[in-house]
Image (tube, coloured by chain):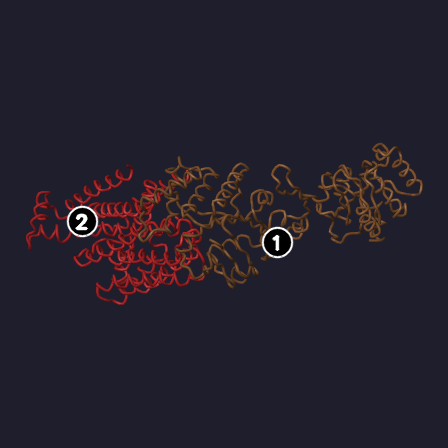
Chain colours: A brown, B red
């Protein structure tokens, strides 16, 4: 079963929430709909479920317009777990889950042996087989959630919609639920869930749909959607994106909100490597447009730059810095207001980078962070150390790591270059 | 097990109360005579008139009215997902009283009173449904119903005001207290027909009524038309209530307590709950009416007073036990 949304507009009287959404959901795919509060996640799910008729556009189930199908037909194909499902009376778990068979039964809805079997199966699937005769009110929060999930599964749907299914669950239940729906998707269901937790979404979803103000801001793999830029545009927060070395999936880490001036004050080249520049990048990236050079993709500074969305001049691992990389760095230096040299390790392979900085920029626009460390980390037989001494003598400035976050010493760069 | 026990107990108590209802009454008739006239009626004999013309139809109609009100109350509680809803929640009682009062005030024939009451009942519910239609969910309907009930009460009050000191004043007042003194053949027939059909329909629709517990959205996700379904069920409940009220006035608390009690005992599955409530409501009203007939001979209390006197303390006990 394929679900296709075409230019879907939907909302509530006097207030459209979805402003033209076109998407496609395929079997076997777990799609997570993310976005800030009020972006239209719940409205999107309600529109797909048919509970909210679209005011323009359409939802197609395998090419059939949802609005033209009788609700009972829809309920045989599609089930939805609401964010706050209601149960007006204290039914037993079995009585509740039996209601899920309603769409499949002719009037007056007497359960057949097959239907009873389905109920037993879904209760086992969600792990409530021992609690069938218990009253709903005696269940724990996680068990209640699973009872409603069993109700949806008893419909034996091909499309499963879940609105914030992990809200109010502890982390154990959250992971259990995500693994459960992930397994459902792998069995060929279309699974679409709205979720606030971006890391949970990134860890389990095949595809993310990022909504903002009723429109699709981005859609694609978690790595494509969860970029610092898109996260900032959608949520107004600063995020660093990492890739988990164990699972290969991306995850986010939150950074302090940057000052209200969204315009960058200027361009800076940061010379780093070996992790010496990571904190410098984090401190400067909110204010300056940064270029890190020259590092290899195995370098932890490279990963920090990726997480912060900082441009990098790259060299292959274990190779000396090539003329190509130097030319690229030179181009950046000429377009920059200055360069910040992190207390990194210099050896024969990357001495050329320091030499290039000294050549390309006037000394007063070069900032050395803890230069005494550079002398300690000198593997060039003293050449790098001498170069640092010379720069200091010519007027290069020294910054302590603490001074990076205050604007004063770097402030005069704002007006220059860039 | 529990179900069989509850139904069995209700059956036994019902049979016992029925025997008492036939044996007891102002016209003193020994048990043997009652039995003889019941099994071998002799037209014209006073014993046969008492048993077949008075006590039996009255007992049957008492049971039927109790069953109808309990069914309607059970449906209303299910629809509104509120165990404190009664058959009168949409203004049926107020509408019926105003209709009956109007007919009495205009001095129409006695057979016009049930018609006026039924018309008032349907008018009240129809108005509530129509006025609440722009609102979503059940809350709007319940609010409009309560408001209309108050409006119709005021109309009845106005009619009472203008008939004050009149014979009609007493008649209206007596009617509003509720009683089972109209018990002739065709009325029992109408009651039996409506109650039977209503009970059958509600049993068939029981599982859908269960699904309404999931709320408007939840029911829709199971492929139901919640609004249509609610309209149908309100219609059936109104038919049951209006018929009961048209013949017997507004008898309180049967329709509130019995479904509530049965839910506590048997759970909320309406396919079990509603038949049990019907049986319990019937037995309860039959017992209350028998008590009303024999408590202060030769006077006969309006049965609405008896259900209130015995029902309210019991109801309060239930509520307090539930809240704990």
Is B181 located above or below residue A91 in the figure?
below
Depth-wise, is mark 2 or mark 1 nearer the camera? Answer: 1
- B52 to the left or right of A342: left
Image position, residue B272 (x, y; %): 30, 45
The circle on residue A91 is none
Could you tell me how far apart the alpha carbons at marks 2 and 1 are, in whole angstroms? 85 Å
Q: Give residue B204's position: percent from left, percent from top.
A: 29, 52
Nearer-the-camera pick, B55 or A43: A43
Chain under callout 1: A
Q: Position of residue B61 (x, y in %)?
A: 21, 52
- Badge 1 density bin: few <14, some 14–19, many ≥20, Cα 10 Å: some
How far from the left and from the top, in percent, is residue A255?
69, 43
SS class, disc 1: strand
Q: Dot 2: few (<14), some (14–19), or many (≥20) neighbours within 10 Å?
A: few
**Which residue, given by chain and number where applicable, does mark 2 sit on?**
B298
Residue hosting label 1: A218
Question: Is residue B113 toward the left or the right of residue B130 in the image?
Answer: left
Q: Nearer the viewer, residue B16 or A125?
A: A125
Q: What element does badge 2 sit on?
A: loop
Up-down relation of residue B111 to residue A268 (above or below): below
**How many circles with numbers are drawn on the protein?**
2
Q: Are labels 2 and 1 on one chain?
A: no
Near-viewer residue (A231 or A363): A363
Instruction: Return the residue nearer the eye: B20 or A136.
Output: A136
Toward the right, the furthest residue is A393
The answer for which chain carries disc 2 is B
The answer to whether marks 2 and 1 mark residues whose Cβ atoms lie closer than 8 Å is no
């Amino acid at each position: 079963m394929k679900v296709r949304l075409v230019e879907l507009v939907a909302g509530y009287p006097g207030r459209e929430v979805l402003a033209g959404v076109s998407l496609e959901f395929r079997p076997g795919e777990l799609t997570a709909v993310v976005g800030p509060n009020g972006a239209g996640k719940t409205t999107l799910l309600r529109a797909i479920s048919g509970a909210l008729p679209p005011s323009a556009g359409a939802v197609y189930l395998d090419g059939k317009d949802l609005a033209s199908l009788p609700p009972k037909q829809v309920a045989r194909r599609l089930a939805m777990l609401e964010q706050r499902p209601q149960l007006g009376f204290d039914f037993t778990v079995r009585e509740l889950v039996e209601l899920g068979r309603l769409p499949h039964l002719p009037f007056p809805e007497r359960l057949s042996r097959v239907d009873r079997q389905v109920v037993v199966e879904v209760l086992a699937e969600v792990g409530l087989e021992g609690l069938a005769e218990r009253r709903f009110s005696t269940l724990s929060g996680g068990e209640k959630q699973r009872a409603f999930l069993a109700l949806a599964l008893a419909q034996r749907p091909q499309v499963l919609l879940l609105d914030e299914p992990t809200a109010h669950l502890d982390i154990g239940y959250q992971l259990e639920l995500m693994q459960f729906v992930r397994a459902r998707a792998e069995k060929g269901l279309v699974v679409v869930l709205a979720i606030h937790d971006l890391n949970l979404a990134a860890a389990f979803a095949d595809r993310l749909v990022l909504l903002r103000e009723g429109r699709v801001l981005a859609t694609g793999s978690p790595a494509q959607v969860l970029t610092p830029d898109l996260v900032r545009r959608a949520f107004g927060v600063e995020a660093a994106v990492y890739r988990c070395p164990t699972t290969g999936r991306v995850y986010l880490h939150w950074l302090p909100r940057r000052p209200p001036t969204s315009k960058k004050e200027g361009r800076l080249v940061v010379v780093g490597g070996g992790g010496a520049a990571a904190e410098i990048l984090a401190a400067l990236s909110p204010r300056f447009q940064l270029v890190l050079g020259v590092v290899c993709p195995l370098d932890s500074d490279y990963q920090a730059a990726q997480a912060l969305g900082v441009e990098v001049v790259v060299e292959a691992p274990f190779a000396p810095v090539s003329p190509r990389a130097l030319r690229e760095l030179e181009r950046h230096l000429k377009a920059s207001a200055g360069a910040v040299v992190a207390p990194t390790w210099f050896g024969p392979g990357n001495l050329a980078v320091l030499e290039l900085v000294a050549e390309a920029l006037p000394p007063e626009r070069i900032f050395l962070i803890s230069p005494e460390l550079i002398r300690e980390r000198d593997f060039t037989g003293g050449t790098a150390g001498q170069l640092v001494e010379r720069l200091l003598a010519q007027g290069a400035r020294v910054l302590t790591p603490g001074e990076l976050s205050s604007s004063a010493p770097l402030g005069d760069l704002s007006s220059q270059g860039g | 097990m529990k179900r069989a026990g509850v139904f069995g107990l209700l059956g036994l108590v019902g049979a016992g109360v029925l025997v008492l209802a036939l044996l007891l009454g102002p016209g003193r008739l020994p048990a043997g005579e009652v039995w003889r006239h019941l099994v071998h009626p002799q037209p014209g004999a006073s014993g046969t008139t008492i048993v077949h013309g008075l006590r039996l139809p009255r007992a049957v109609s008492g049971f039927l009215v109790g069953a109808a009100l309990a069914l309607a109350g059970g449906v209303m509680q299910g629809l509104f997902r509120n165990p404190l809803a009664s058959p009168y929640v949409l203004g049926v009682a107020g509408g019926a009283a105003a209709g009956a009062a109007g007919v009495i005030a205009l001095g129409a024939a006695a057979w016009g009173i049930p018609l006026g009451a039924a018309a008032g009942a349907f008018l009240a519910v129809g108005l509530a449904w129509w006025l609440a239609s722009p609102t979503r969910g059940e809350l709007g309907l319940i609010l409009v119903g309560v408001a209309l009930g108050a409006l119709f009460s005021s109309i009845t009050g106005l009619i009472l005001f203008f008939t004050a000191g009149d014979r009609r004043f007493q008649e209206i007042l007596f009617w509003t207290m509720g009683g089972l003194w109209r018990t002739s053949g065709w009325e029992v027939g109408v009651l039996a027909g409506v109650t039977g059909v209503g009970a059958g329909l509600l049993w068939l629709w029981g599982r859908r009524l269960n699904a309404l517990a999931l709320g408007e959205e939840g029911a829709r996700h199971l492929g139901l038309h919640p609004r249509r379904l609610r309209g149908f069920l309100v219609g059936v409940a109104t038919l049951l209530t209006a018929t009961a009220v048209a013949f017997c006035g507004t008898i309180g608390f049967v329709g509130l307590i019995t479904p509530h009690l049965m839910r506590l005992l048997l759970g909320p599955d309406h396919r079990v709950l509603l038949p049990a409530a019907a049986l319990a409501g019937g037995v309860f009203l039959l017992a209350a009416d028998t008590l009303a007939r024999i408590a202060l001979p030769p006077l006969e209390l309006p049965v609405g007073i008896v259900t209130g006197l015995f029902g309210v303390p019991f109801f309060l006990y239930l509520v307090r036990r539930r809240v704990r």
